[in-house]
């Protein structure tokens, strides 16, 4: 019984796929029209008739249009260059400030008037209590006499 149900479902699925393929072959653009609503779930608003603009006209652009576009391009180029130069200046200023901060000694806290900060004294190391130090010790080790055990002969 299970195998008969599986075969029926497989046959129906195959039929549905073949039907969709036939419909797609007969109406290729219809699939694209309805695809947006299937993907987003939002229907496309009603389209308004397009008004012909300068880019939609079939006539060749006039010299005045070309000159206007050239001026706009130059203005954009100058503005973009000024922005980039400004950014470069800001970056170099930040870098210079960072270098100054790195090289400058750390700032000492300000002291209120009338209060004097005493400098910290470094500790003085005690001298060695040995009379002659290292040289005498070396000389003593060189002349050291060892007691030998008595020999029995």
Image: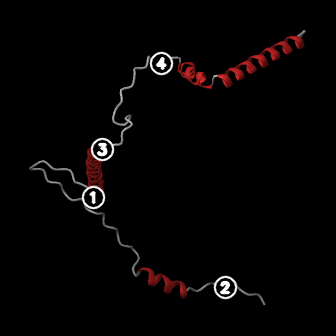
Q: Is residue 87 above or below residue 45?
A: below
Q: Marks 2 and 3: which is nearer the front?
A: 3
* Kind of element beneath mark 2: loop
Q: Marks 1 and 2: which is nearer the front?
A: 1
- In percent of the image, x 22 and y 54: which residue is there? 108
Res 51 → quadrant? top left
Q: CA distance from mark 4 to mark 1?
A: 55 Å
- In percent of the image, x 71 and y 23: which residue is there? 21
Q: CA distance from mark 4 to mark 3?
A: 36 Å
* Kind of element beneath mark 1: helix
Q: Nearer the viewer, residue 141 or 69?
A: 69
Q: Earlier in the sequence, mark 4 or mark 1?
A: 4
Q: Which residue is mark 4?
A: 44
Q: Which residue is mark 3?
A: 62
- Residue lying farthest to the top in this orientation: 1
Image quadrant occupied by the N terminus? top right
Q: Earlier in the sequence, mark 3 or mark 1?
A: 3
Q: Residues within 10 Å of mark 2 (few under 14, many from 20)?
A: few
- Residue lying farthest to the left in this orientation: 114
* Kind of element beneath mark 3: loop
Q: CA distance from mark 2 to mark 4?
A: 115 Å
Q: Marks 2 and 4: which is nearer the front?
A: 4
Is the C-beta separation of discs 4 and 1 under 8 Å?
no
105 left or right of 33?
Answer: left
Q: Earlier in the sequence, mark 2 or mark 4?
A: 4
Q: Which residue is mark 1?
A: 96
Q: Position of residue 54 (x, y in %)?
A: 33, 36
Q: Marks 4 and 1: which is nearer the front?
A: 4
Q: Residues within 10 Å of mark 4 (few under 14, many from 20)?
A: few
Q: Which residue is mark 2?
A: 148
Q: Position of residue 119 (x, y in %)?
A: 21, 59
Q: Earlier in the sequence, mark 1 or mark 2?
A: 1
């Amino acid at each position: 019984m299970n195998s008969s149900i599986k075969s029926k479902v497989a046959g129906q699925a195959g039929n549905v796929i073949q039907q969709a393929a036939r419909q797609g072959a007969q109406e290729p653009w219809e699939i694209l029209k309805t695809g947006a609503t299937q993907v987003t779930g939002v229907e496309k608003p009603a389209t308004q008739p397009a008004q012909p603009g300068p880019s939609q006209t079939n006539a060749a652009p006039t010299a005045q249009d070309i000159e206007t576009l050239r001026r706009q391009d130059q203005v954009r180029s100058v503005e973009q260059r000024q922005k980039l130069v400004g950014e470069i200046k800001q970056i170099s200023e930040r870098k210079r400030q960072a270098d100054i901060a790195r090289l400058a000694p750390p700032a000492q806290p300000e002291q209120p008037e009338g209060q004097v900060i005493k400098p910290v004294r470094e500790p003085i190391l005690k001298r060695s209590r040995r009379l002659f130090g290292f040289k005498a010790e070396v000389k003593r080790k060189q002349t050291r006499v060892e007691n030998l055990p008595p020999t029995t002969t």
